Image: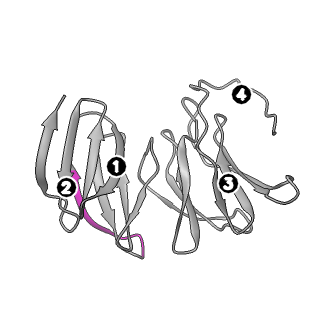
């Protein structure tokens, strides 16, 4: 159990899904912070502010592991590459996300609040970007050799995982 003060910032009071790696638990909070806890002792090891904005700072993008670093972000901040032991922010990527990126075939797939899906190489360099919808992307998953992405504006698309071209689409 971990108690945290309710922030005075504009927030939707969301928190990311916890992520466990090497006896540590990583979780993002509604106040724009991400923290690491010792799984064995339950003590906080470090915390860092991810969000750079003043409104909707929630870290609701669940942390993931990519090339030995933690990747997490906030709707109102950049996607961050974080050292898992120290919490140092190694790099910020100019992508605003509301959901966690996906590791797919050794690459990172990022979906943005602007309706884009972006494929990044192992060095986090952009390979290709596809505009899927007019609103925020709500999820992206690996499925049947491709990627399935959905948006809050009712698009669901099956994407080619090499060039992000649309193989099939469905509108709710």
Q: Quadrant of residue 145?
A: bottom left
Q: Residue at x 37, y 55 (%)?
A: 110
Q: Residue at x 81, y 34 (%)?
A: 3
Using the rendered view, name the quadrant where residue 30 is placed.
top right
Quadrant (top left/top right/bottom left/bottom right) for the C terminus: top left
Given residues 93 and 164, the one toward you in this image is: 164
Q: Which badge, 4 or 3, is on the more N-terminal residue?
A: 4
Residue lying farthest front? 144
Q: CA distance from mark 2 to mark 1?
A: 10 Å
As helix, strand or loop, the secondary structure at mark 3 comes to strand
Asked if the residues shown at circle 3 and circle 1 are in contact, with their CB atoms under 8 angstroms apart, the answer is: no
Residue 26: assigned label: 3
Question: Dot 3, crowdedness within 10 Å: few (<14), some or many (≥20)?
Answer: many
Kindly report the distance in space between the C-alpha atoms of the residues bearing marks 4 and 2: 38 Å
- Residue beneath label 1, please? 140
Q: The residue tagged with tag 4: helix, strand or loop?
A: loop
Q: Earlier in the sequence, mark 2 or mark 3?
A: 3
For the record, the magenta segment spans 123-130
Alpha carbon distance from label 4 to label 1: 29 Å
Q: Dot 4: few (<14), some (14–19), or many (≥20) neighbours within 10 Å?
A: few
Query: Which of disc 1 and disc 4 is earlier in sequence?
Result: 4
> Residue placed at 87% from the left, 53% from the top?
43
Residue of label 4:
7
Q: Which mark is residue 172?
A: none
**Which residue matches tag 2?**
159
At horizontal 59% and vertical 44% (from top left) the residue drawn is 17
Viewer-closest of 67 and 7: 67
């Amino acid at each position: 159990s971990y108690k945290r003060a309710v922030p005075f910032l504009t927030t939707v009071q969301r928190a990311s899904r916890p992520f466990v790696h090497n006896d540590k638990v990583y979780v993002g909070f509604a106040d724009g912070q991400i923290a690491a806890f010792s799984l064995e002792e339950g003590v906080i090891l470090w915390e860092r502010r991810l969000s750079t904005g003043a409104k909707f700072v929630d870290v609701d993008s669940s942390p993931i592991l990519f090339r030995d670093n933690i990747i997490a972000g906030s709707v109102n901040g950049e996607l961050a590459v974080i050292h898992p032991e120290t919490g140092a922010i190694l790099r910020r990527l100019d992508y605003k996300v509301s959901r966690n990126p996906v590791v797919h075939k050794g690459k990172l797939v990022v979906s943005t609040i602007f309706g884009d899906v972006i494929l990044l190489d192992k060095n986090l360099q952009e390979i290709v970007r596809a505009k899927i919808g007019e609103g925020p992307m709500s999820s992206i998953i690996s499925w049947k050799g491709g990627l399935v992405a959905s948006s809050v504006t009712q698009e669901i698309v099956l994407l080619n995982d090499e060039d992000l071209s649309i193989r099939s689409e469905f509108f709710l």
